Amino acid sequence: MAKKLWDKNSTINPFIEEFTVGKDRELDLLLARYDILGSIAHSTMLCSIGMLTDEETVALHKELRNIYKIVEDGNFIIEDGVEDVHSQVELMLTRTLGDIGKKIHSGRSRNDQVLLDLKLFTRHEMQKICQSTKTLFDSLIEQSNRNKNILMPGYTHLQVAMPSSFGLWFGAYAESLADDMLFLQAAYRMCNRNPLGSAAGYGSSFPLNRSMTTELLGFDSMNYNVVYAQMGRGKCERNVAYALASVAGTLAKMAFDACMFNSQNFGFIKLPTECTTGSSIMPHKKNPDVFELLRAKCNRIQALPIDITLIMNNLPVGYFRDLQIIKEVFLPTFKELSDCLEMARYIIERLEVNKNILDNGIYDPMFSVEEVNRLATEGVPFRDAYKIVGMKIEAGEFTPNKEIHHTHEGSIGNLCNERICELMENIYNNMDFSKIEEAEKTLLGRD
Ligand code: ARG
């Protein structure tokens, strides 16, 4: 028999139930530990305003910590007939504690509970994403420094254009990640505000101490306006999704380059054989499937903000069940992107670069601008120098001077990698995750 928090002795229609519960029983498992942390903070606050006695609160905390342990051990389930994680935790509390368990929901709604769970979950997962992004950044900088003198062609329109280098290529993706980190930080800060106490979206007549739960849960501040707090459902996920999509965009572009540069027609980079996959029919094949899958997965992640936007588009103020569906696309993305970041780092560290690309004469024309610039330095007006070199190339008389000398900031000869590292470190070190770790430990009585 179905057990509903909102049971009023009427019968439940199983057809309607299955449809409305949807994937919650499975997805909410990811939120379980955060639901419990939220309940510990909420009950502490209820005690402080006289809604629970000290003994009741001690009993609740003991039981909530037991349930947390069950989650950690991988044994937490949402039972058949129970709608979601919020109902399951309350059910477990009432089973062991009776009336005490029934008191915990005072001044709270599942609407602010799920808001809170999502923010705590997201905050935690973003910490991992930021760490993996930083690690990949470090590997790219290392490859950039190691290969800073190795030239490769630069392209525009996929036509050979000007000299570039592996120092520039690897470093470009590192700097891109530094910008992505700024995006992650902004999304993280928006996420790190407490929605608890907004209840169904309009607050409560109990004198809730929201500053107290904000502090207990280690948030930077709260979403003050209760109506806005509820509006944050979907908005928070969408903003975070934009930040994740930004990282994914960097990875997808890099993966495309790598697939292309690894092809025989380019032959700029090589994957160790053990990092390639074979063909069932063509015995010679060593395919860069790793980069292809990275590209596809990261392209799909870039659709996430749009997915979320479409789910919540045109919803007026207040809670709607539509918002539940966002969990289906949002929650699994963190693991997907983490796996991609981890694999990207692994494969980037193992990439071998071709040191003799420019021996091939098809790249000679890319030194044309160097020659134009040389003449211009000697006093020939740029436009005339351009014409002289252009005519030589047309007549097949151009012999390139491959000694190049680029000195300005961010160029082949002056990568500014230390400055790029500084940029990244300033953003990364500004994100203090220790406060949330401390808060969670205290709530669990583990300090
Ligand atoms: N599973 C629901 C969700 O994710 C929980 C909130 C339910 N609230 C409600 N008013 N039905 O949105």
Image: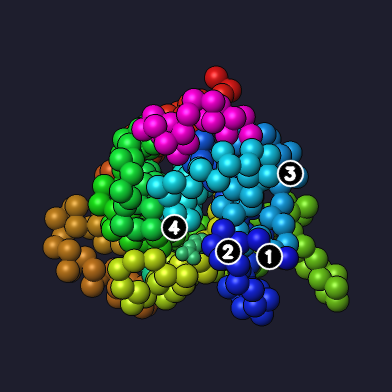
In front: mark 4 or mark 3? 4
Q: Is residue 169 magenta?
A: no
Q: How is the image coloured?
A: rainbow
Q: At which x and y percent is residue 30?
A: 61, 51
What is the spatial separation of the Cα atoms under label 1 and label 3, in whole angstroms? Answer: 24 Å
- Amino acid type at image mark 4: Asn
Is disc 1 surrounded by few (<14), some (14 to 19) or many (20+) residues within 10 Å?
some
Is residue 211 depicted above or below 306 in this figure? Answer: above
On screen, residue 25 above or below 29: below
CA gap between label 3 and label 2 equals 29 Å
Mark 4: few, some, or many residues within 10 Å (few <14, many ≥20)? Answer: many
Earlier along the polypeptide chain: callout 2 or callout 4? 2
State which quadrant residue 97 falls in: top right
- Quarter occupied by residue 16: bottom right
2 or 4: mark nearer the eye = 2
- The answer to whether residue 229 is left or right of residue 302 is left
Residue under label 3, please give it: 74
- The residue depicted at 30 percent of the width and 40 percent of the height is 207
Using the image, determine if residue 355 lies above or below residue 422. Answer: below
Can you identify the residue that label 4 sits on?
111
Using the image as rendered, state which of residue 168 and residue 62 is in the foreground.
62
Asked whether residue 53 appears in the rendered view, the answer is yes
Q: CA distance from mark 2 to mark 4?
A: 17 Å
Q: Which mark is residue 2?
A: 1
Q: Is mark 4 within 8 Å of ligand 1?
A: yes
Q: Amino acid at mark 2?
A: Asp
Q: Give the residue pinned by disc 2.
A: 7
Say if mark 2 contacts mark 1, CB within 8 Å: yes
- Using the image as rendered, state which of residue 223 and residue 239 is in the foreground: 223
